[in-house]
Amino acid sequence: MITGVNLGNWLVLEKWMSPDLFEPTTAEDETGLCQQLDHEIKRERFRTHRNAFVTERDFAYLAGLGVKAVRIPVPYFVFGDVEPFVGCIEYVDRAFEWAAAHGLKIMLDLHTVPGSQNGFDNGGLCGVCRWHRSPDDVEFVLALLERLTSRYRGHPAFWAIEVLNEPISEELWTTLTGRESVVIADWPADSGFRDPAAEAEIAEVQRVVTEVRRFRSDQGLQPGQRVPARLTLDGTLLAPHEDAIRQLLRLQPEGEGTRLVLIDQLQASAAARNAAGWEDCLDRLAGLPGEKDAWPRRFAAYSAAFEPVIGPQEGPPAGYKGDS
């Protein structure tokens, strides 16, 4: 038996996992997002997300838990040769190096195809299922699988390729549509009903759960480990959901022990240098070898991401003498 985990929402986006990445567009899937965003904003948004969402620290952490393999969903535009999408093959290359360094194996999962194989958001295109109708698109995918196999088959971290994620079955399609066949059935029509208040509550719960889960991971907490926590939710949309949030995040009621309270706010102009410093610290806590001059490189990347949003960023603090 192989003990493994899935690294979803890194190279194939799913809106329910990171709704903020889709703002301010009206897109419900990655295809719509890439069509609506300005080219430069799109490339910078994807670069920032991919650089931070999964890092070598995560591979080191998983190996420390005894995980033996990771499944990495990749899109059909992984090689960057399909407009208007942003390719990501360099991140797959990094993942293989990280996996080899920490004794993990990789299963590549082709998660999307042109025209979609299931019509779901995780297929990259909601409400459409027509890949199987296009011989050219089928041939494109077969050639893509061959390219991926040729690129990684000799790598020590390579384990397997999942040829396609969740292609819809005839039985499932007829259940969803009430029609006879996947070949002739139309996708179910949108009823048009919307409940903005309920959607706002769901989005808020998703944001909190996602952020706290990432914080738990950064702190090295075990997935099932219960920890005491104080939640101040009175008067917010989240108040009715406190019990569910605590259950999802393994949070016990606050008890005796250390309490960390934020009593000051960092200057916006220091955000990039602090983020770069914390990343260096997290690498050291994870036992990763230090990189010479890693801080300036990370500072430059964070500055490029932060300055369009919160303004100019200050350089290194007084007394900085470089990475040791």
Image: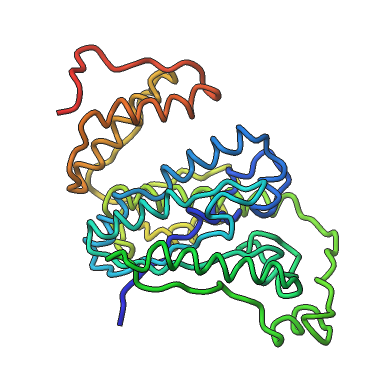
Q: Position of residue 79 (x, y in %)?
A: 53, 53
Residue 69 appears anywhere in the view: yes
Say which quadrant the N terminus sits in. bottom left
Q: Where is residue 27 in the image (x, y as percent from the top left)?
A: 71, 49
Q: Which of 311 and 212 is in front in this view?
A: 311
Residue 303 vs 54, above or below: the answer is above
Q: Residue at x 64, y 70 (%)?
A: 139
Q: Which of 95 and 306 is in front in this view?
A: 95
* Left or right placement of residue 316 versus residue 30 in this view: left
Q: Nearer the viewer, residue 256 or 51?
A: 51
Say which quadrant the C terminus sits in. top left
Residue 238 appears anywhere in the view: no
Q: Where is residue 178 in the image (x, y as percent from the top left)?
A: 82, 83
* Left or right placement of residue 14 versus residue 58 in this view: right
Specify how the rendered protein is coloured. rainbow
* Left or right placement of residue 34 versus residue 304 in this view: right
Q: Which residue is drawn at 41% across and 43% down?
A: 52
Residue 99's image quarter?
A: bottom left
Residue 96 vs 182, above or below: the answer is above
Q: Which residue is drawn at 85% across and 59% down?
A: 192
Q: Residue at x 34, y 58 (%)?
A: 96
Residue 301 vs 121, above or below: the answer is above
The single residue placed furthest to the left in the displayed view is 324
Q: How many marks?
A: 0
Q: Position of residue 246 (x, y in %)?
A: 43, 58
Residue 156 vs 50, above or below: the answer is below
